Amino acid sequence: MANGIQALTENQTWDIVPLPKGKKAIACRWVFKVKYKADGTIERHKARLVAKGFTQREGIDYHETFSPVVKFNTIRCLVALAVKRGWDIHQFDVNNAFLHGDLHKEVYMRLPPGYKVSSSSVVCKLKKSLYGLKQASRQWYDKLSKTLITKGYSRSANDYSLFIKKSSTSMVIIAIYVDDPLVTGNDPTKILNIKNSLHDQFKIKDLGQIHYFLGLEFNKIDTGYIVHPQKFIKDVLQTYSIMDLPTTTMSLPAKLQLVHKMENPLVDPTLYRQLIGKLNFLMHTRLDLAFSIQHLSQFNQTPSQSHYDAAIHVLQYLKGKISQGLHFNNNSSIKLEAFL
């Protein structure tokens, strides 16, 4: 908490002022989280001050909230290109990313718990964005994208979170997923320069070559990379108590017949929808699940026990093939092949 307050103070996130007449101050709270490495060991303990953005009023405290993030299809294409070209893929994390976004509306917030001032009748007038604000992600993206453009990067028309700087002899590519960017290219000097430049402005944490990104593990081998969500699958199996159930060889039971309205509807449909959401994430690297998950996703509105049992069957299939993933080979050929 002390480190968080220090970062907010150094970033000049707010001014301490009396609350103007007619204005309403939103509340805030501390959120504590344990960050884990890919192998399940603890990386660090984290305390973050979060504004209770659900109390904000549209048109008064904010206008636009949408913020683009890099598509998983773009990430797969980027990794495939880098591996085939022999480029290193670097990843880094922006410290307190949302705190760098500039606010264009007057937003007042109550004093953070544990923050001591001489008067109890004052509030924080936010000058910078804060986690929890509805516009926080948008303002951070706006700040980072403008910074990259001023440094000579151009934004892709196909993916607004992909930035490219290209010359006759070099190319550097940056993909942004909120505060977790990837950078690759054939010019190590320019890659180092952009990392140093971003560190000077935003204070980044260089994580080295890609190894764990958005729940996916990147294992480097002689023939390229194996990308798989093994830790994510283990967490899901543990959540749904699958470890004691037998494995299956098929992702769905043979002769399965599911329709929209079946007997024994689930009392809480959210359980089914959450499970389907987790399975949908796995499709980024587990294409063998594509048909099964597409089929089960059709029953989110009124799921029954039979639908839920079929989804659990998918988890039993995953248990027996937990280490499978995508192989990005380093063969120099970039020939696109399709199969009918």
Image: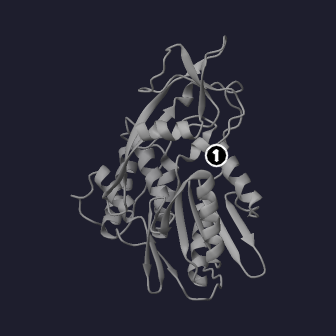
Extreme residue toward the bottom, this view: 332
Q: Residue 53 location in percent, x, y?
A: 56, 30
Q: Where residue 32 sits: x, y (%)?
A: 38, 39
Q: Can you say whether 96 is above or below 55 in the image?
A: below
Residue 269 in sight: no
Foreground: 224 or 336?
224
Q: In which quarter of the image is the N terminus?
A: top left
Q: Which residue lies furthest to the top in this view?
A: 21
Frontmost residue, 334 versus 89? 89
The residue singled out by tag 1 in the image is: 140
In the rendered image, the quadrant that contains the C terminus is: bottom right
Q: Residue placed at 31% from the left, 64% from the top? A: 319
* Percent x, y of residue 236: 35, 54
Q: Residue at x 49, y 58 (%)?
A: 214
Evaluate whether residue 72 shows in this view. yes
Residue 317 relative to residue 171: left or right: left
**Residue in the picture at 60% in, 67% down:** 183
Residue depicted at 46% across the width and 70% down the height: 288
Q: Which residue occupies the foreground of this view, 35 or 308? A: 35
Secondary element at image label 1: helix
Q: Name the colouring of the figure.
A: one colour
Q: How many marks?
A: 1
Q: Is residue 237 left or right of residue 192?
A: left
Taking depth in this image into account, of 315 and 41 the one nearest to the observer is 41
In the image, farthest residue toward the front: 118
Q: How crowded is mark 1: few (under 14 residues within 10 Å), some or many (20 or more)?
A: many
Q: What residue type is labelled 1?
A: Trp
**Vertical relation: 180 (above or below) 173:** above
Q: Quadrant of residue 38?
A: bottom left
Q: Which quadrant of the figure has residue 23?
A: top right
The image shows residue 76, relative to residue 37, as above or below, that is: below
